[in-house]
Image (tube, rainbow, N blue to C red):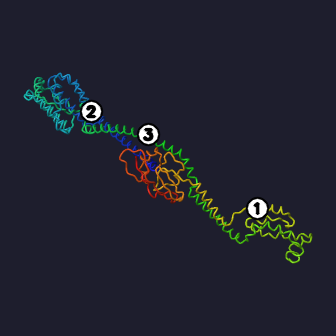
Amino acid sequence: MIRKRLDFTIRIIFHPLHSTFMRIALYCALLFAGLLSANTTHAQTELGKPTLDEAKTQIWCATARFVYEDTGVPNLKSTLRCDGSLSAFENSIKADKQSVYSRLYKPLEGRGAIYNGLTTDPARLSKLTTEIINRLKTPARTNDPARMQRLTALEAGLKTFVENGTPLGDIGTSLAAEETADTAALTETVDDSDVGVALPAGTSVSSPRTYAAESTMSKLFAPIALVFSLLSLVLFALQRGQIRALSARAERHRGELETVKLAAPGGGGSAKKLTPELQRDIERMVEQRVAATLAQARPAAQNLPPKSIAPAPSPAPTRPAAPAPVTPVATSAPVASVVAAPVASTSPPPIRQEAPAPPPAPLAEAIIAPPAVLPAGPPTAAPRDDFDSLVPPVQLPAPDTWGAVAPLTSRQEDQAAQPSRYYVKVPVNGGFSDYDLQEQPQHDSIYEIKVDAQRPERATFRVTSNTAVHAYAIQSAQYSLREACRYQQPTGPVSRIVTDEEGTLFKSNGAWQIEQKAAIHFE
């Protein structure tokens, strides 16, 4: 029971620490995931340093303006969505009036093959501009100096934007004097290309707004944020399960504590009683005091003559035997001087004077009775009946039996008061404490102790025959059986304990110490 309570106390102390650690880890994971999600969703760049998505938008807007200006349809430039994201720009060119989407944008940006092996944004943007210029360099443009001049201006503007971040202007407007573009040549050029690339986009020149875009940091930490979010959910689920388990264990242990509290008054009452050893010590001290008092009174009784007690009533027949009362008065001068006053009044006083002769008889009783019991007047003035009534008869035991009767009686009472059997639950520190002993078997008593009547300081013990307790003892054998019993570990399921040889105990310092363990086996 002590180890079980200690184990429960350790669990009560350390389990909140474990729950606190799990809760802190859960909160940290949620906070980190929130920060990463915020970084992914609300990432912005400074003005003049567009993100990858903004750079791609700006490059494709400049390219579309060039194509519309080169093909003679500059009015279509107003339909372009260059002030938004790349997806907004893509939706604005899907009408495909000049085949910009189907023959130029979709093969390069939609398939994204040109970005294979590239890890940095500048490299991707440079690759995108190179592919766009290569597709626009058709024989019709290379043979036309005016159109080639506009294409060269576009190439220079794209390279400047990629290298320095300089915003692109409307190259077609600055070269409005040039010839109308050849649509057939553009179609030819686009038909020759079948490679799709995921190109970067830039921010529109007309609007310096910045938008959330995909970056290397976002691509790196977005999966990590997702992992931490899932981990936080798992930790939350585990935490709920542990809380429920902890609540169930707390309820179970609370019930056990209530049971212990209900059983505490019975145990406390037995602890308040005097232990058998203390009772024996008190009785031994009383016997010693009584024996010492009787030993002091014994020499005084031995010095008295043995006839001083019995012959007290015998002088009665000798009283009338004195024939001459005058003779003793004349011969005993000292006696006459003591009783001179009473003798002068009457003649028979000499007969009554012999009555006080047996005063030695009451002297034997003076050891016990106080001298104040004697009559106030002379003996001759009081009748014999009154004198006897003043000294009640006392029946005392013989002096030789005074020292033997009291110890025998106390020893018999000690044996009668001391029980011969005790019941106890488990051994503690190699023995059974007197405070744990019960005179009646309890619901959890595992051992039965039998005290030797001839030698009260010796006893034997065995496992109780109550099979209802055996299952609990087998389950907790580590601290209920190991210290007091010798046994072989069972190899299969068992439900009963059989005592083969009783163990022996000896009394020491208020506890029954185990001298020899009991031999048991399981069935």
- For mark 3, what is the residue? 248
53 vs 69, nearest the viewer: 53
The mark nearer the N terminus, 1 or 2, is 2
Badge 1 local density, few (<14 within 10 Å), some, or many (20+)? Answer: few
- For mark 2, what is the residue? 208
- For mark 1, what is the residue? 393
Residue 483 lies, with reference to residue 131, above or below; the image says below
Identify residue type, mark 1: Pro
- Mark pair 1, 3: CA separation: 79 Å
Residue 476 location in percent, x, y? 42, 48
Mark 3 vs mark 2, foreground winner is 3
- Quarter of the image for residue 412 reads bottom right
Residue 298 lies, with reference to residue 228, above or below; the image says below
- Quarter of the image for residue 134 reads top left
The mark nearer the N terminus, 1 or 3, is 3
Badge 3 local density, few (<14 within 10 Å), some, or many (20+)? Answer: few
Identify residue type, mark 2: Pro
